[in-house]
Image (cartoon, rainbow, N blue to C red):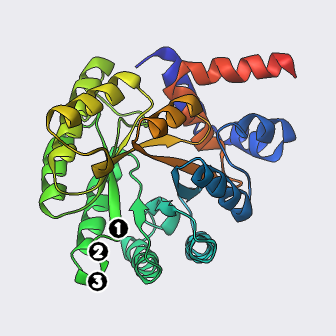
Amino acid sequence: MSLLRSAFIALSTNQPLRRFSESSSAGRKLSSRFVAGLEVEDALRAAEMLNNYGMTATLDSLGESVVTEVEAHKAAEVYHRLLDAIAAQKLKANISVKLTQMGLEMSPDLAYTIAAGLTEHARATGNFLRIDMEGSNLTQVTLDLVRHLHARPEYAGHIGIVIQAYLYRSLPDIEQLIQEGIRVRLCKGAYQEPPSVAFPKKTDVDTNYVRLAGMLLSSPIYHGLATHDEAMIEAAKTYAKNQGIAADHFEFQMLYGVRRDLQRRLIREGYNVRVYIPFGREWYPYFMRRLAERPANVLFLAKNLIRS
């Protein structure tokens, strides 16, 4: 892991800097490249714009690690509003939820109850709920919750999960998820993990990502490959072509504000592209992790600061 990435991941947990950044106009201006806005309406407008470009969207109300049951239900209510608005506006969009935002660290039962309610709402509106993955200490409980909900016949196909390629355990996890018919969003991973649980070298993460992507593409389920790495994208495209896998059997997933040129190029080439749209007032940890992932993001912001 590079020193730059380690530094930004460490800063993502710095509470004084977070409080200052989220309350300052300068901080909000910086974050606007990667965060759609502060309100539900901002996210919906961004989704409509992406739909007009031929892309689908995933909406994420930023926030994690709530400390009261009231906060957990308040966070869930934002997602219920999103599901109703997506249906009313006929947007091609779904939602992504972090379980710590639903109270997981206080009570797994609370998180399960809230996730079940959101899954039911997604089912009722013909939509889909993605449960995001967080640090490796929460991997197993997240998998257990998603598998348990998906096993309920009425919820099959309406809930999915994220798997991180830098974890050693991800291959058997994906084998199990494919067997159970659960949709997967494959990403490399954005948290700082020890070498006891995750590949420390980027080359090993990349190799594992390509291997896991091939497993997902070869399965009968519609999965998402989340990456901005053109080498990973080309590897997936080549594998699909060689195996006779149709372009509409899967989708590439990217982040709002990152590699817009690549997003549009993939659409022109006939691939499905979904853009992850984060919004909300608690944007700081997400923003810092985006800077940690790609040095180009830091350079982009620096250039814009100089121009302003």
Amino acid carrying mark 1 in the image: Ile
Which label sits in the foreground, 2 or 1?
A: 1
Relative side of 131 to 292, left or right: left
Residue visible at 63% across and 21% down in the picture: 298
Q: Quadrant of the C terminus?
A: top right
Residue visible at 21% across and 75% down in the picture: 151
User: What is the secondary structure assignment of the residue under circle 2?
Assistant: helix
CB within 8 Å, label 2 to label 1: yes
- Place residue 144 in its image quadrant: bottom left
The relative height of residue 34 versus residue 231 in the rendered view (above or below) is below
Q: Quadrant of the N terminus?
A: top left
User: Can you identify the residue that label 2 sits on?
Assistant: 149
- Mark 3 and mark 2: Cα distance apart in space: 9 Å
Which label sits in the foreground, 3 or 2?
A: 3
Relative side of 223 to 217, left or right: right
Q: Position of residue 305 (x, y in %)?
A: 80, 21
- Mark 2 and mark 1: Cα distance apart in space: 8 Å
Residue visible at 31% across and 48% down in the picture: 250
CB within 8 Å, label 3 to label 1: no
The relative height of residue 259 versus residue 101 in the rendered view (above or below) is above
Q: Position of residue 79 (x, y in %)?
A: 57, 70
User: Can you identify the residue that label 1 sits on?
Assistant: 159
* Residue 154 marker: 3
Amino acid carrying mark 3 in the image: Glu
